[in-house]
Amino acid sequence: MDIEQKYSVNHYLVAALLNYVDNKEIAIPEIQRPFVWDATKVRDLIDSLYQGYPIGYIVTWQNPDVKLKDGSTSTGKKILIDGQQRVTALTAAILGHTVKNTDYEDVRIKIAFNPKEERFEVSNPAIEKDDTWISDIAPYLNGQQRLREIRDTYCSKNLDMDDDKFEDILEGLKDIKKKEVGVIQLAGNLDIDAVTEIFIRINNQGVPLSQADFVMSKIAANESYGGNLLRKCIDHFSHLAVKPEFYGKLEKNDSEFVNSEYFPVVSWLRNENDDIYDPTYVDILRVAFTYKFSRGKMSDLVSLLSGRNFETRVFEQRIEENTYRELKAGVMDFINETNFKRFIMIVRSAGFCHTKLVRSHNVLNFGYILYLKLKSRKYTFEKIEKYVRKWIVMSFLTGRYSSSPESQFDYDIKQIDVRPFEEFLNDVEDAHLSDAFWNVELIQRLDTSASSNPVFNVFLASQCKMNVRGFLSTDITVKDLIEQRGDVHHIFPRQYLKDNGFTKGQYNKVANYTYVQTEINIKIGKKAPLDYLGYVVNNQCNGEECKYGGINNISDLEKNLEENCIPKTTSLMSLSDYQEFLLQRRVLIAQRLREYYFSL
């Protein structure tokens, strides 16, 4: 059986490669940040070429030939998917091009050369004043300065340098442009899975680009339908969401983006500090694509951006054009201030008041997809709020997107697309939130020592939503303690259990965790519940000194224990009761979670 060759390998002179880049035959997409290499790495790259060492293959992906509306065929350009930093470094050092740094400022990276030592260095003020150095090799390599001019200047200042030897050395420097670079060109008709597999096999670090990176590459390389600016919008939004202070540098340094339609739409982030949901560029792509195209697999977006007709397997311009238009619309809906803030409001209204309670971006991603989808279908905001809140909590509790999230996204969005959402939600609840789930599975999932356990985090969110007080607190709430970055403490004190031979895995059980004010926890120390909670019951609630918090009557104490799902009999417990305590508390937490979910 003949197996089709999936790629070709060519060797280009550095000069030819840079010419292809200048003529845009090879497109360099800015995926996340424009240029992240330290200048010393640029120096090392030039030195490797000078010494005749290999600098590794670069990888391009031939965009497929696309059938145009008039019936003719357009040849796709090559997209650089691995080697962006190396090629950009070459354009900077050899051609003298500026590069954009992480603040989107245009900067020059000048590489200096010492002919006497045949050594390269990053140019600096000291080197510029040192006559033994050529402070910038670019003017010579790009043809702006002639060899004779440089020789006369250099040798007049360095009388010990022989003219002929200098010329030989400079010819060797110029030979950098004649060194070969290997280019692996992936075929345009390959699907994303094949491209990813090839990339893994040929990448010497064995680290694949994500499919979202491939998407960003395709978007950034497309100027016909504004993909280059759309890529910037996605990147800048995700950057501003984390660092609002970046706004000033963006406004100053990226005039192309500032003058685009996107800038006013993202500008609200300059005053935004909420960090419950700081989406990455991957999150933005996933949400916008799944919402607009009702597909969950990023590989499908790569194909659609190329214009692939899934039925005929032909690449068509109209599909490519429509994909960019719809993806742009999805991104614009994602970054819309009203949409984003209302979604965050829904998340917070479920009790998720802090990032430590939100351990899965995929849950929030699908929650936002659901919000945008229901809004586009004209659901009332009351219903949107209710459904999104329940879906997010259900997803956290069941681990819906913890494995194979793309496949689950694909299934869920297709179900939502073909029938009323409330019908689908009822089916999911019947299938996954049965009595067995609440009475058995959830209790078992709480038998863990991981404080980041998503079920326990939902329990904390339920406490925040119901505004309950911290353990033994009269006024300070669990929400207050979480927002002030307080820590969870042990109801059966850690040191008490440790001193009695319990291991870390035994005393660090989530059913033993609760939020309590630090000063109360210090007073508790390593006492058994029988001692400190027994004192609260028998002494503190009978008019004696308040040692452990300010609760001083039994009914308020019982309410506080009930708020924190702590068994009332805990005040009678000591070491031998620890395992029974854990079981009882897991049962109480599971019951609370059931009440909480169906109250949303």
Image (tube, helix red, strand yellow):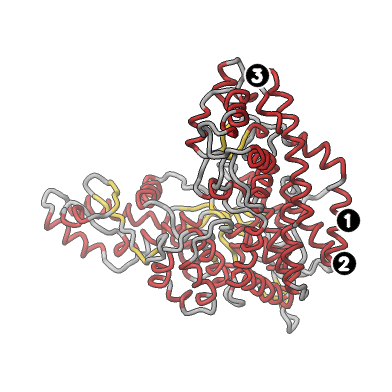
Residue type at mark 3: give it.
Leu
Between the C-alphas of marks 3 and 1, the distance is: 44 Å
* Earlier sequence position, callout 2 versus callout 1: 2
On the picture, is 537 further left or further right than 428? left
Q: Which mark is residue 419?
A: 2
The residue mark sitting in front, 2 or 1, is 1
Q: Secondary structure at mark 3?
A: helix
Identify the residue shown where x is 53% and y is 50%. Answer: 483
Residue type at mark 1: give it.
Asp
On the picture, is 522 further left or further right than 538? left
Q: Residue 20, percent across and down?
A: 50, 66
Q: Of residues 172 and 283, which is closer to you in this image?
A: 283
Residue type at mark 2: give it.
Arg
Identify the residue shown where x is 49% and y is 53%. Answer: 181
Q: Which residue is mark 3?
A: 575
The residue mark sitting in front, 2 or 3, is 3
Q: Residues within 10 Å of mark 1 (few under 14, many from 20)?
A: few
Q: Which mark is residue 520?
A: none
Residue farthest along the front direction in this orientation: 543
- Report if residue 8 is visible in the image: yes
Quarter of image, res 375? bottom right
Q: Of residues 416 and 44, which is closer to you in this image?
A: 416
Q: Secondary structure at mark 1?
A: helix
Identify the residue shown where x is 69% and y is 68%. Answer: 306
Identify the residue shown where x is 78% and y is 58%. Answer: 410
Q: Residues within 10 Å of mark 2 (few under 14, many from 20)?
A: few
